Amino acid sequence: MTEQPINEVRTPVEAHQPRQMSQELFGTFLSYRRALIDAAARILGCRAGAEDVVQDTFLKLMDQQNAIVVRQPVGYLFQTVRNLAIDRHRRAALEQRHAACEEDGLLVASDALSPESITLGREALGTVAGALAELPERTQKAFEMYRIRGMTQKEIAAILGVSPTLVNFMIRDAMTHCRDALFGAA
């Protein structure tokens, strides 16, 4: 096997002869390869991405079913590179819009409650229910109608046959008793 001289390093594109691409288009591609990369780099803002686009252009031309005849090969190549670069730029922008940093997902609060928070909530509810059971029945009813049913103090007073001021005191006493049961008397 013969070794290739160092000064004759061939690019992967030059190493393969085209199957379907016309010799003229192939020669034009090789001649303008650097200019095509520069054109794609201006659109993408990235030289590595531009080289990928030019390589994709070459592959696209190679995949043609029949050899195509191009009247203006330079313009055709630049337009093809431009279109592929714009497509790649749009795809990257779309991915950027819809993709998030992996760490961002760690900061999202979960809608699901942890077993620990469920247990703590049930214990707190049991404590409040026990504290309410210790209150007089009329105070319990006033508290339930106000906090659970959402009734006004005036409506509760009419139902219980007491003044709205007394209803206010009963609700306040029930709240204080429940808070003391949950957090201890201050």
Image: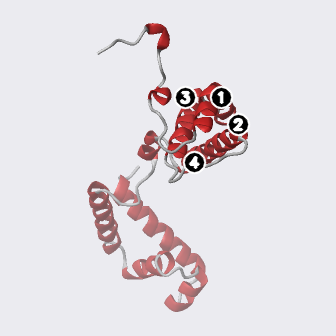
What's the distance in space between the residues labelled 3 and 1, CA to CA? 17 Å
Q: Earlier in the sequence, mark 3 or mark 1?
A: 1
Answer yes or no: do the residues labelled 2 and 1 have beta carbons within 8 Å? yes
Where's residue 148, x and y in %?
A: 46, 77
Give above or below for 130 relative to 179: below
Q: Nearer the viewer, residue 85 or 149?
A: 85
Count of numbered marks: 4
- Mark 4 Cα shell of 10 Å, populated few (<14), some (14-19), many (≥20): few
Pointer 2: what residue?
A: 74
**Of the two numbered discs 3 and 2 in the rendering, the one whose residue sits closer to the viewer:** 2
Q: Which residue is located at x 52 percent, y 50 percent?
A: 64
Answer yes or no: do the residues labelled 4 and 2 have beta carbons within 8 Å? no
Q: Which residue is located at x 42 percent, y 9 percent?
A: 5
What's the distance in space between the residues labelled 4 and 2, CA to CA? 26 Å
Q: Earlier in the sequence, mark 4 or mark 1?
A: 1
Numbered disc 3: secondary structure: helix
Q: Earlier in the sequence, mark 3 or mark 4?
A: 3
Q: Nearer the viewer, residue 112 or 186?
A: 112
**Of the two numbered discs 3 and 4 in the rendering, the one whose residue sits closer to the viewer:** 3
What's the distance in space between the residues labelled 4 and 1, CA to CA? 26 Å
What's the distance in space between the residues labelled 2 and 1, CA to CA? 8 Å
**Of the two numbered discs 4 and 1 in the rendering, the one whose residue sits closer to the viewer:** 1
Pointer 4: what residue?
A: 91
What's the distance in space between the residues labelled 3 and 4, CA to CA? 16 Å
Pointer 1: what residue?
A: 32
